[in-house]
Image: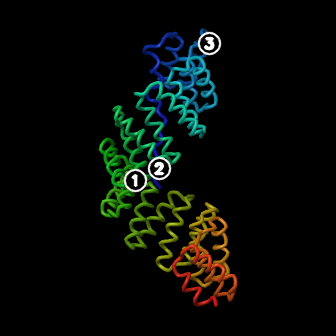
Amino acid sequence: MIKFLIAVVLLISFNFHIFGQSYKSSYVHKGVMKANAGNYKGAIKEYSRALEEDPNNYIALVDRGLAKVELKDYHGALQDYNKAIKINPNFGKAFVDRAIVKKELEDYKGAIKDYDEGIRLNPNDSVAFYDRGSDKCFLGDYKGAITDFNRAIALKLKTEGVFYNRGTARYKAGDYRGSIDDYSKAIAQKKDYAEAYCYKGEAECAIKDYSNALRDLDRAIELNPKYAEAYCGRGTIKYDENLYHGAIDDYTKAILLKPNIATYFFDRAVAKYSLNDSYGAIEDLNKAIELKPQYVAAIFERGLAKYSLYNFKDAIQDFDRVIVFEPDHGKAYLLRGRSEVSLYQYESACADLSKARDLKIFGADDAIAKYCH
């Protein structure tokens, strides 16, 4: 699964206010020095003294909020940003920093609204465009994310993270070649960027460029031998090339590294089923469903494996569950109908086969002609 490098950018935070601001409290200066030294509790004390000196010092409020963010006191930081914005609603940085807190509190839509206002007040804030793009990625607005990343790059923010995230947005939008180009740019800036190698490999797999995909995934594993996603991605390539034993080996390595990822068990189950190991497939699918009880694809595949073993009664139970979660899952109706035929339940079988035909599932017409008179 492609991941986003969602950045919480504080790289210019504590020094931003020094230039061109009306407040020049010695306490704020001391707070900045302590914050830059990593003494956030001490910094908060200095900012609080500055606020005792002048309760309207919005710079002290913003910087105290940043120090609280470093200590993961997000609610306290939010209160400081709210006060700063009330005092000076034209201070764009306060909106951008508050957006970071809202992101941490999983209020992504609220974060984007704050980025919007921060960018309106400071339209050349490349970091704000970058962070807003990351949030849009998380919310599935890939087109909007790409636009924001483009703007950040145009404003000279050309870090490996920007190219990596834009590559991921392009991948999610189906622009695999564009994503490969961006991952390559990220790697050019950071030669040991294992994640970029991994997802570049997955993008290459999507366009069936398996030789380059294997090369990049091998490189990701070389850089990080405990990189479960890279093993899974390499397993998928081997599966696509019908190298089922090799695929199982890689999926097993991924599972050993991350035993609580349902998709790893599902992928290994599918590879086992391709080798006619239905019992092994069912074992893995049981684990996948245990980890993710509403995993419809796993429930269906388990029903299919049971069907292949002529365990029609249990197969029907799985197809029942699939249809509860996805009422228009045509293949589940088809296989439930075929299972019911095998149990001589012709009335319900024909109803299911008719539903499969209505959903335009291949094979439904032939089954109806054979079993339903």
Q: Element type at marker 3?
A: loop
Camera-side residue of 275 and 204: 204
- Residue that carries the numbered disc 1 in the rendered image: 199
- Residue that carries the numbered disc 2 in the rendered image: 3
Asked if residue 344 is positioned above or below residue 178 in the image, the reply reads below
Q: CA distance from mark 1 to mark 2?
A: 8 Å
- Residue that carries the numbered disc 3 in the rendered image: 55
- The location of residue 218, given as percent across then percent down, is 35, 58
Do the residues under discs 2 and 3 have CB atoms within 8 angstroms? no
Question: Within 10 angstroms of label 2, few (less than 14), some, or many (20 or more) residues?
Answer: some
Asked if residue 275 is positioned above or below residue 135 in the image, the reply reads below
Q: CA distance from mark 3 to mark 1?
A: 49 Å
- The location of residue 296, given as percent across then percent down, is 60, 65
Q: Amino acid at mark 2?
A: Lys
Camera-side residue of 365 and 163: 365
Q: Please report whichever mark, 2 or 3, sits nearer to the chain's N-terminal start.
A: 2
Question: Within 10 angstroms of label 3, few (less than 14), some, or many (20 or more) residues?
Answer: some
Q: As drawn, is 42 to the left or to the right of 228?
A: right
Residue 205 occupies quadrant: bottom left
